[in-house]
Image: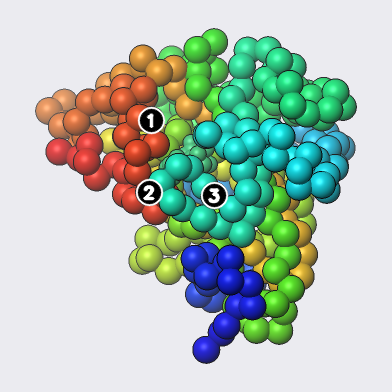
Amino acid sequence: MVVLANPALHSIPLVGSPKHGARFPGIPVVDLSRPGAGEAIVRACEDLGFFKLVNHGIPVELMRRLEAEAVKFFSLPQVEKEKSGPANPFGYGDKRIGVNGDVGWLEYLLFVVTSDPLSCTSMTACSFRSALSEYLVAVRKMASDVLRSMAEGLKIEPRDALSKLAMDEHSDGIIRLNHYPPYPQLRGLNRSLTGFGEHTDPQIISVLRSNDSSGLQISLEDGSWVSVPPDQASFFINVGDCLQVLTNGRFRSVRHRVAANGVKPRVSMIYFFGPPPAQRIAPLPQLMGEGKQSKYKEFTWGEYKKAAYRSRLGDNRLVQFEK
Ligand code: GA4
């Protein structure tokens, strides 16, 4: 039996070993600069709800700059960091995720993305804010290209049918910077600790970039877990619950989790693209053949989000909206 020395951690569960060990070879790779990108995106979203994006046009230096700023923040004394917390739900959070009792071996910063990213926080250094601002602008543009390409692959018009939901001035964007410190007691044990417990993302898509430390795992259709080999020059895109509904269940909102290891810190930054609060979320009419019924009851993003914030991290949040 594995006994963790730190009693404060007894509530953070260990994570089982995923299939294929450290390197799952089956993550779809989409080259955004190629003509067939749209079809490749659609295939990946149907199969796994997840893919890696290369040739996305964002210089790795921009990612590294924000990563370095995040590392600088997370290296501050705990009392300093806590001046920006507790995350409720925004701000600095330590081990507690959401407000319903979920915990993980991580610390994080969670911000709302406003139309003026420079004003999104008063609690971080100026250099942090400018790195964040530039990063957000670049990722937003890239995500818009991904969603247009997705619409092309789905053969739906207008081509901005999806991107306009995520890029509207009232769209509900969130940026999350996560730091998973190594947990040295795990070294040599072939076990990992829950960094971020299994869940699906409620939004349309999530765009993740991490440093070269592993930890992200996704669940396949048969319920098995596989590790995603990290790649600091690429982005990983998740299908979220809203996109599953917009495609009437054709795309899969992927369950994923992060395992903290004993060796290397993991730093990730994720931009969650949510629609405007008043946006009705229902299957796109362009994807509904004649007589085809929606699998979901109607809801707005505001209603869904409210329900999500009342749930536990690992809950299946879409179930209560299924017909
Ligand atoms: C999961 C996706 C995003 O990280 C997040 C998370 C949010 C939070 O950390 O505050 C939630 C979680 C996420 C879904 C259910 C609720 C809300 C924690 C939680 C238990 C920022 C989001 O939008 O939903």
| Residue tagged 3 | 96
Tell whether circle 2 marks a residue whose Cβ is less than 8 angstroms from ligand 1.
Answer: yes
Q: Is residue 75 above or below residue 17?
A: above
Along the line of sight, which residue is nearer the eye, 255 or 9?
9
Q: Is residue 125 above or below residue 267?
A: above
Label 3 and label 1: CA atoms lie apart by: 19 Å
Examine the rendering and report whether any part of residue 226 can be seen: no
**Picture coordinates of residue 175 (x, y %)?**
62, 32
Q: Quadrant of residue 261?
A: bottom right
Q: Which quadrant of the rendered structure holds the C terminus?
A: top left
Nearer mark to the viewer, of 2 and 3? 3
Under mark 1, the amino acid is: Lys
Under mark 3, the amino acid is: Arg
How packed mark 2 is, by other alpha carbons closer than 10 Å (few <14, some 14-19, many 20 or more), is some
| Residue tagged 2 | 312
Disc 3 secondary structure class: strand
| Residue tagged 1 | 305
**Picture coordinates of residue 294 (x, y %)?**
19, 32
How packed mark 3 is, by other alpha carbons closer than 10 Å (few <14, some 14-19, many 20 or more), is some
Q: Image check: 257 left or right of 281?
A: right
Under mark 2, the amino acid is: Arg
Label 2 and label 3: CA atoms lie apart by: 12 Å
- Mark toward the start of the polypeptide (2 vs 1): 1
Nearer mark to the viewer, of 2 and 1? 2
